[in-house]
Image (cartoon, grey):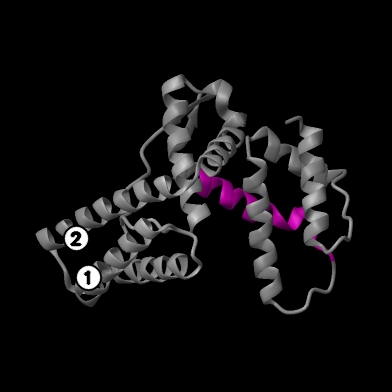
Amino acid sequence: MQVADFCREIEAYLCQKNDGHLIRVVGPSFDLVSCWAADGVPLKVAFRGIDRYFERYYKKGPRRRPVRVDFCDADVLDVFDEWRRAVGLTEGAGIVQAEAAPERRNGSLPLHLERVVLRLSNARAKGMVGIEVEGLIDRVSSELDVARATAGGIRGEARRALLDRLTTLDAELLNLGRAALDDGQREMCERDADEELAGFRDRMTAEVYDRARGALVDRLVRERLGLPVVSF
C-alpha cells in the first residue's frame, strides 16, 4: 500500500470512529501517519491502536470533541510493539528476523489462570467454536479451576509440571481451533497474515517469513474464535 493510500484509509477509519466527523490527515498528522507506514505498521494494527485510544476516551464520559489522529500515536505504537513481539519479529541492519516469543518472567499465575477461564467461558457462551472445541474448553476449564486453587502456592517441580501442562493444553486448543474453521475462514486468516506482513516481506528470508506467518495465522485464529493463550 502506498503511503497516500495508507493515510486515506486511516482518515476514513478515524472519520467512522468520530461518528462521521471528518478530521483530515494533513500537515503534521500526515507526517505522523506516514511514519507509521514507513515503519511497517499494518493497517489493521493501526486500527486496533486507534480503537484502544477510543475505548479509553469513552470511559472518561461523553465525548466533547472529535479525536485527532495525533492523539492515537502512542496507542498505535504500543499495539504495533505488541504485534511484533507476538509474531516474533526483530529488526537489525535492515533485516527482519523471527524469534520465538520471549518467555514470560513475571506476572501472577493465578490471575493468568483466572483470565484464561473467563475467556474460555466467553468463547463457549458466544457459540464461536465447534462441538470438539467446546469439549476441550470444558476440560481445560475444569483443569484450570483445580490449578487456580493452588497455583499461588505451587513451587519447584510442581510449578514446572503445571506450566508444561498449560503449554500442552494451549497447543491442543489451538489445533482444534484451526480445525474448527471452514476453508473460507482459514483462507481469510492466511490472507490477513500476508497483508499484515507485507511491509516486512522484502526484508525477510523465506524461512523467517514462514515462521512469522505461522505465528500470525495462529494469532488470528485465536482472535476469530475468542481463544486465549493458555500457556504462561
- Image mark for residue 162: 2
Q: Nearer the viewer, residue 14 or 67?
A: 14
**Residue 72 % position (x, y):** 70, 56
Q: Which of 52 and 167 is in front in this view?
A: 167
- Image mark for residue 147: 1
Left or right: 65, with 131 as reference point: right
Q: Quadrant of residue 139?
A: bottom left
Report the residue at 63% width, 55% height from top: 75
**Residue 151 % position (x, y):** 22, 70
- Quadrant where the N terminus is found in the figure: top right
Mark 2 vs mark 1: which is more N-terminal?
1
Q: How far apart are marks 2 and 1 (CA)?
A: 8 Å
- Quadrant where the C terminus is found in the figure: bottom left
Span colored in magenta: 66-83
Report the residue at 58% width, 35% height from top: 191
Residue, far left? 157
> Can I make out residue 160 in this image?
yes
Q: Please say if 84 is above or below 206.
A: below
Look at the image and say whether residue 69 sits in the magenta stretch: yes
